Amino acid sequence: MAKAHESLCVAAELLAQEHTDFCASRAYYAMFYAAEAALLDRDLAFSKHSAVMARFGLEYAKTGDLDPKHLKALQSGFAARNQGDYGLLPVPKEEAVHLLAQAQALVADVQAYLERKGYPLAGV
């Protein structure tokens, strides 16, 4: 979760400097790290991004343990990250702003979920 929070901070800094491609990438990774942390709670770990997204959907979105909107945010974040890292066109500022807000919500919800489960994450 510490990496998720650090990625959120960096994404906000990059957005403030109008670096929307890199903001989108860091916002996605904040969500990705949070999803990995949630999956670790269930003793699940994966090496591929697609596997993390798929299992996060099964374990959390479909069960209602976390809001299903977070799976959609993770998926759209992956697409934006690919556009920002590899695409010819930049990620539009409005998209980067929206993605960062989605990342903040996902990270906060995963953090609250893990804290309810008894993990000592205060101050992370």
Image (cartoon, helix red, strand yellow):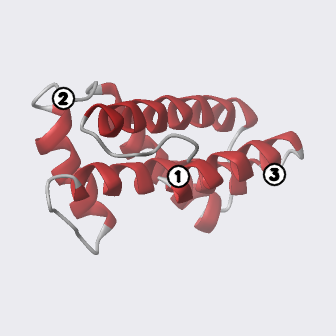
What residue lies at 28% left-to-right and 75% top-to-bottom?
Answer: 47
The crowding category of the residue bearing disc 1, from other C-alpha atoms within 10 Å (few below 14, some 14 to 19, many at least 20), is many
Which of the pair 25/36 is nearer the observer? 36
Between marks 1 and 2, how big is the CA–CA gap?
19 Å
Which of the pair 105/75 is nearer the observer? 105
Q: What residue did someone put label 1 on?
A: 4
The crowding category of the residue bearing disc 2, from other C-alpha atoms within 10 Å (few below 14, some 14 to 19, many at least 20), is few
Residue 122 spot, x, y in % from top left: 51, 40
Labels 2, 3: front one = 2
Q: Can residue 90 be seen from the camera position used here?
A: no
What residue lies at 21% left-to-right and 52% top-to-bottom?
Answer: 41
Extreme residue toward the bottom, this view? 47
What residue lies at 24% left-to-right and 59% top-to-bottom?
Answer: 40
Which of the pair 43/103 is nearer the observer? 43
Q: Amino acid at mark 2?
A: Asp
Which of the pair 10/79 is nearer the observer? 10
Residue 89 spot, x, y in % from top left: 69, 54
Q: Amino acid at mark 1?
A: Ala
Sequence-earlier tag: 2 or 3? 3
46 vs 22, left or right, is left
For the residues bearing labels 1 and 2, Cβ distance under 8 angstroms: no
Q: What residue did someone put label 2 on?
A: 65
Q: What residue did someone put label 3 on?
A: 19
Q: Is residue 33 above or below residue 110?
A: below
Element carrying mark 2:
loop
Total number of numbered labels? 3
Q: Amino acid at mark 3?
A: His
The crowding category of the residue bearing disc 3, from other C-alpha atoms within 10 Å (few below 14, some 14 to 19, many at least 20), is some
Element carrying mark 1:
helix
Between marks 2 and 3, how big is the CA–CA gap?
34 Å
Q: Is residue 57 above or below residue 22?
A: above
